[in-house]
């Protein structure tokens, strides 16, 4: 008879398996609490009086009427902010509340706290602000002119936030020696993050005078530093908690409502305060993706080998810096695409205007750059008479190549293999027969794009994570989630890693969500680095905990069996430890009970290795990671069908082939890539963001159209799973690579149908119909 | 200007990428030398006089005429063998040359060496052997009877080589409590390995008296021990070299021609000798897959949860033990399939008969056991009224489950996910419409099977590998292939691992093929453990070498730059080392030149961890790994189309879903799974091995039909890539899991068409037609 016949029904998460998300059930049942779901006892509502001008001097603020309204607790202005009143991650230029000048439409002028939302709205309306309108600038090219209005006169270089140049080989000069050249001038539009959960949070004063904030934020640890300077309160006096976020995509990378909440809590007579943007307020006050104007010139030799690139990127960061400089940096590092080009000149400038503030947004400059590069390369392939897939394969980077930005690729590079996989896929192989079988009044085209995306922060900003795991006194595994989960599923992946190492199932695990008072300092949930960095940390913390558990169990077994035992004979099983040769078992709980709390908790501090290459080009470009060490790679293919009667375009099929290293949880991975692609489709075709004199005209979901499930095709995702050395279990980041190439893939597909390129902004039906008319390909009714 | 603009065109192998095999070019051009390709100067041919009886006493051998023929160098018999004259891995019972008795048709009686093949054949024919025929036994059931002829009278237990029992829970008794039961009696046939390269080799005496052998062998290191005892020559006096093998599949696991070669070389007057079996001789003298007779009874409760298994397996090992005991062990460990069954009784016996010798063959007992288990489970599903896929999913093992053989599964288990993937696949989902659309006179069916396969040797026999890597004086990486490559591509995978760690391309790498004088002792190329075990060893050896190279390079850089440098700033690149911050480079050659040969060579000894569970069941079953620690998992699906006029069956589509951990080289992995499946199709339907009185009637490729490319469908392979802790880069073995379930999948598909099971031997057209007649489903012409 065999000694073990008890089947273990609990399933432990394993790396490589599509484990259901830990939060799946609590989210679908509505039980999970987002920041928006917190309603502290006796709370007050806080809200903002916003500027009605894009650029104006504040002459006076008369809040007497508002202050006197019953139920109004406080009405504050910039003068009530005791610190620098300046937020910003690198460039601290954005007031919490305007102090004298407003620089964009909707800028916060006054902060009101009231008993109810109704009273709040009335009080806000009752504040009378007298403005002296100032001349304003809305076009980034105008902003560069010498006679332009200057938004921040104390800056040395006018409206330029950052301007730089990368040059390799002979630079742009080499274009003259090229057998074939092509050029495009492309402009891409603003994009709103359109998170399901708008900016929100609650705050209160603790008894010791410190400020507790529960907010929808990607950056709880860093937020404390931003707040500290702006409010002149030491960072350790803030406790910031980040529950699961209802979407963020970069829109919550840094302070949104946290400054207002802290300020309101300090002035609310000890009562908690709550804020929650309406959709319209989100449009008005939230950050956006940077629009960009890009000029690309690209050349190759007779054989189709790329020789020279000359490109310039002009971005509009709006009224304040936010992460504008860093977005430009990433765009410039990726501007030449994943290709070998010996001679390059990449110029980039990001300027202030009186438009809304642009900052981080999934892709972080790369979707913009790819929109330029992946269109010009198609044009060049056409000029050289080479198939666009073959052209890309010919020129793709490999491990050991140098990118157009001069970055030596020392880590895994799956670009060539992604392209080859797509080139062999039926969606590419059978494209002509699909195009030829378009129904009446429809035309079809297939477009591709290739892209890559640097992972993490690079050589200047420490890309670190501090993981903590605990074996609770009752034998459960507690995972401290140091990097917030904005919906991408990283919290579950951390559990999966811990469960994989410790062989424990979800039923024996708990999490502590990101909280500056409980979890350990870790950098933000951003930059495709979330699972990469914290994953490495949590794996090591789990290995240490496993060792401690087994060592203590060995002692207990030895006591019991009165003999020296071998640690290799012990196996950690769900809820217990087995001594294999004897078949004896100890409950994990018993082992936990014999350990001190300091033994039961393990931590591990991980900092991502960086590219040590010293760049002799691209002055000032190192803040956001230039040069990156690890990149993910991707190819996007779309099958586009165009109704020549209406100009309506459908994406019929979409293929995303990704090298993001080994895949830890296939389902979560696919969700990331699908989400990126859906957002990319919105960016390409739907989200026709419209501004007039700095005022957003598309400020709700009836005017700003995001794609619905009906607009998104079935997507196929295939992978090239190269084992990356640095990543936990060979993975690389997958958060952004899925969006980067969608717009140019669609644009390339459309161009093949229309016979010309639509190079300005969103690829909307009106523009398509107009272009069809121009090329004479419009259907005759 | 950026400092690095030299693109590196050489591609280094990366884990996860389909790298072309290192030997691809030399093999397709015919340049690569197999053992058969060696023709030493002045060599002689050696050959064998073989028994014409299945069981006989040798009265006399008259070789006078042969010896006197011009060009005959030597004629040897068992009397010329100075050692024990006994080969065998565990049981040493097989003479190199018969000494008194022959026990199977074609047994070696005399060894001849001659100048030419012609003379050799004439000399063999001229040897006159007088036999006294003995009663013989060919049926394993007969062999078990008390009055049976006994092949090896000195053994304690008659013709039984090994008999054992595994019993868990209440054993077979629990069947009576089952709501549903099913039973099948299945017999499976012999199978020939049918390698492209038959057994062959050359041997010569070295000046120091030692014997050098180049042979087509899976086990060069172990061969020395076998030869040493049989020939009474110390093991270190043998040098055995194993070039790439032209197929082996277990048929070259142990001594084939090596004993003859050594003996001939010792008696050839110092001249080299060569042997090379003809196809017919291979059939006659080579080992086979064990035929088996299996009785399976299986029961489940009302809900379809498996409760009890009663099974017995009877195998025929032929005249000698070879690996017969170990094959039975593996069959018994896997007899209950990858399911949770609390109560089991598994009986197994392997017996001697006067049939050909059976031994290792890809699958090693598991394809036999799966043929029983995977048919009875389909019958039980039918009885319980549950879909066979759902039935398997319900009962599949998970990590932490205990197998029907009582083995606790502590490592990754992808069974459930493999089943779920197949259940969602179009070949399963759309099966009914495919079946319904069969053309006239054709009927269609879809069959599935699930299986698992233990990796490596387990707790008794050390599963070890000693890897060696060298940086040559001129800066190249030399990989010493300690475990022979029989065509599965493991040599290339070792290069891939070394190249991955050291970032060197094939163009900067060399190999030294398996050679007891040059490579380090490592266990055999077998048991799905080849890449697993040596891969772990070579990875660590590469890590050590990398560290040494970087440390020495650091020193050289420091000398040159006159400052302290940081080792983290160095990057190993193809052919050179880069100091990233300065952009300075050192050729690998220069670093190699500054290292001592003892520094340039690194070794690593790896022994696979084992399952420490002490089994209280299955006495004597531990030699071949019971209980295993790591298993691979697989599901096979076939779409079968049957011509009801002719009985001809085609496999229209085949799907193999495999959990063999992470995949290091997708192309090589797929080739392994495809090769296994093709061999499984041959086993199931084509290779109708036929014996009469111990004599093989199907002894060439015109009578023993192996499938051709025309008979093999396009196969789809999908994976569940769980990251196994033990395996290098998360992999598990993939050599055998592809074959295990093919026969029962085909049988299940056929049974659904025919309405009854063909349970005896190969599923050939004649049997199918007969069965169709019996069930009245034959087409009426």
Image (cartoon, coloured by chain):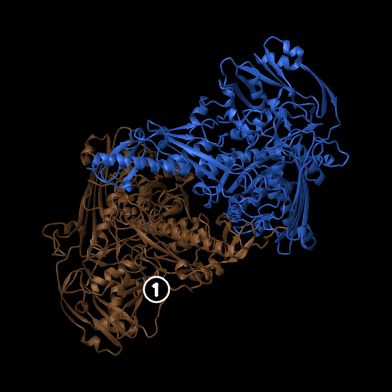
Chain colours: A blue, B brown
- Left or right of A698? Residue A206 is left
- Left or right of A192? Residue B664 is left
Mark 1: few/some/many CA within 10 Å (<14, 14-19, 20+): many
Residue B6 at x, y = what percent?
66, 63
Residue A598 at x, y = what percent?
42, 35
- Left or right of A526? Residue A112 is right
Viewer-proximal residue among B472 and A195:
B472
Residue plotted at (46% across, 37% down): A469
Residue B74 at x, y = what percent?
26, 84
Determine the residue located farthest toward the left in the rendered image.
Answer: B147
Say above or below: B125 vs B369.
below
Q: Is residue A179 visible?
A: yes
Quarter of the image for the C terminus of chain A: give it: top right
What chain letter is assigned to the residue under label 1? B
Determine the residue located farthest toward the top in the rendered image.
Answer: A70
Viewer-proximal residue among B176 and B781:
B176
Quarter of the image for the N terminus of chain A: give it: top left
Q: Is residue A314 visible?
A: no
Q: Give the number of callouts.
A: 1
* Element type where label 1 sits in the image: helix
Say above or below: B537 vs A497.
below
Residue B207 at x, y = what percent?
34, 83
- Left or right of A2? Residue A19 is right
Q: Which residue is under mark 1?
A: B35
Viewer-proximal residue among B668 and B447:
B668
Can you tell which quarter of the image residue B278 is in?
A: bottom left
Residue plotted at (26% across, 79% down): B111
Say above or below: A231 vs A148.
above
């Amino acid at each position: 008879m065999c000694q073990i016949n008890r089947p273990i029904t609990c399933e432990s998460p394993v790396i490589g398996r599509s484990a259901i998300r830990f939060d799946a059930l609590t989210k679908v049942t509505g039980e999970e609490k987002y920041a928006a779901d917190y309603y502290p006892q006796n709370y007050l509502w806080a809200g903002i009086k916003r500027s009605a001008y894009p650029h104006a001097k504040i002459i006076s603020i008369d809040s007497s009427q508002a202050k006197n309204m019953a139920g109004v607790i406080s009405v504050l202005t910039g003068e009530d902010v005791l610190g620098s009143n300046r937020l910003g991650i690198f460039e601290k230029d954005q007031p919490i509340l305007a102090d004298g000048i407003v620089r964009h439409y909707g800028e916060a002028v006054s902060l009101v706290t009231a008993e109810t939302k109704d009273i709040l709205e009335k009080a806000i309306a009752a504040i009378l602000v007298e403005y002296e309108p100032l001349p304003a600038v809305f076009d980034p090219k105008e902003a560069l002119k010498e006679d332009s209005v200057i938004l921040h006169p104390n800056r040395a270089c006018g409206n330029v936030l950052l301007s730089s140049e990368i040059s390799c080989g002979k630079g742009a000069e080499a274009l003259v020696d090229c057998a074939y050249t092509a050029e495009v001038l492309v402009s891409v539009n603003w994009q709103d993050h359109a998170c399901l959960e708008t900016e929100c949070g609650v705050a209160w004063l603790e008894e010791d005078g410190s400020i507790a904030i529960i907010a929808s934020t990607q950056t709880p640890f860093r937020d404390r530093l931003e707040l500290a300077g702006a409010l002149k309160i030491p960072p350790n006096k803030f406790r910031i908690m980040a529950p699961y976020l209802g979407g963020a995509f970069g829109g919550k990378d840094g302070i949104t409502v946290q400054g207002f909440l802290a300020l309101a809590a300090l002035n609310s007579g000890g009562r908690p305060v709550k804020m929650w943007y309406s959709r319209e307020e989100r449009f008005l006050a939230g950050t956006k993706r940077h629009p960009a104007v890009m000029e690309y010139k690209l050349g190759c030799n007779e054989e189709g080998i790329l020789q020279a690139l000359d490109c310039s990127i002009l971005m509009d960061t709006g009224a304040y810096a936010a992460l504008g400089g860093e977005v430009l940096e990433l765009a410039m590092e990726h501007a030449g695409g994943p290709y070998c080009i010996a001679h390059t000149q990449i110029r980039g400038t990001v300027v202030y205007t009186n438009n809304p503030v642009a900052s981080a947004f999934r892709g972080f400059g790369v979707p913009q750059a790819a929109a330029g590069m992946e269109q010009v390369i198609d044009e060049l392939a056409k000029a050289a008479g080479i198939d666009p897939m073959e052209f890309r394969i010919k020129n793709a980077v490999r491990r050991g190549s140098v990118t157009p930005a001069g970055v030596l690729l020392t880590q895994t590079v799956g670009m060539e293999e992604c392209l080859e996989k797509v080139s062999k896929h039926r969606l590419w192989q059978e494209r002509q027969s699909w195009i030829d079988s378009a129904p009446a009044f429809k035309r079809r085209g297939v477009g591709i794009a290739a892209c890559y995306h640097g992972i993490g922060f690079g050589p200047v900003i420490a890309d670190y994570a501090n993981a903590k795991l605990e074996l609770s006194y009752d034998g459960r595994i507690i995972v401290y989630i140091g990097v917030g989960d904005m919906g991408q599923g990283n919290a579950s992946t951390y559990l999966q890693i811990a469960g994989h190492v410790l062989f424990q199932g979800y039923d024996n695990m708990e999490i502590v969500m990101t909280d500056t008072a409980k979890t350990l300092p870790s950098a933000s949930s951003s930059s495709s680095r979330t699972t990469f960095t914290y994953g490495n940390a949590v794996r090591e913390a789990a290995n240490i905990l496993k060792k401690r558990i087994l060592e203590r169990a060995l002692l207990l077994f030895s006591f019991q069996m009165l003999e020296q035992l071998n640690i290799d004979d012990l196996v950690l099983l769900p809820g217990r430890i087995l001594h294999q040769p004897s078949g004896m078992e100890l409950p994990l709980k018993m082992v936990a009970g014999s350990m001190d709390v300091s033994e039961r908790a393990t931590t591990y501090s991980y900092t991502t290795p960086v590219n040590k290459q010293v760049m002799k080009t691209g002055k000032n470009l190192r803040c956001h990671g230039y040069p990156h060490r690890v990149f993910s790679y991707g190819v996007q293919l779309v099958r586009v069908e165009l109704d020549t009667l209406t100009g309506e375009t459908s994406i019929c099929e979409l293929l995303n082939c990704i090298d993001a290293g080994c895949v830890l949880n296939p389902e979560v991975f696919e969700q990331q890539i699908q989400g990126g692609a859906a957002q990319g489709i919105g960016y390409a075709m739907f989200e026709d963001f419209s501004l007039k004199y700095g005022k957003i005209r598309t400020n709700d979901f009836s005017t700003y159209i995001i794609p619905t499930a009906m607009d998104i095709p079935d997507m196929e995702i295939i992978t090239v799973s190269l084992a990356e050395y640095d990543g936990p279990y060979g993975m690389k980041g997958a958060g952004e690579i899925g969006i980067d190439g969608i717009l140019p893939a669609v644009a390339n597909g459309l161009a093949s149908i229309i016979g010309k390129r639509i190079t300005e902004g969103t690829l909307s039906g009106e523009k398509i119909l107009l272009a069809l008319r121009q090329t004479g390909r419009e259907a005759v009714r």
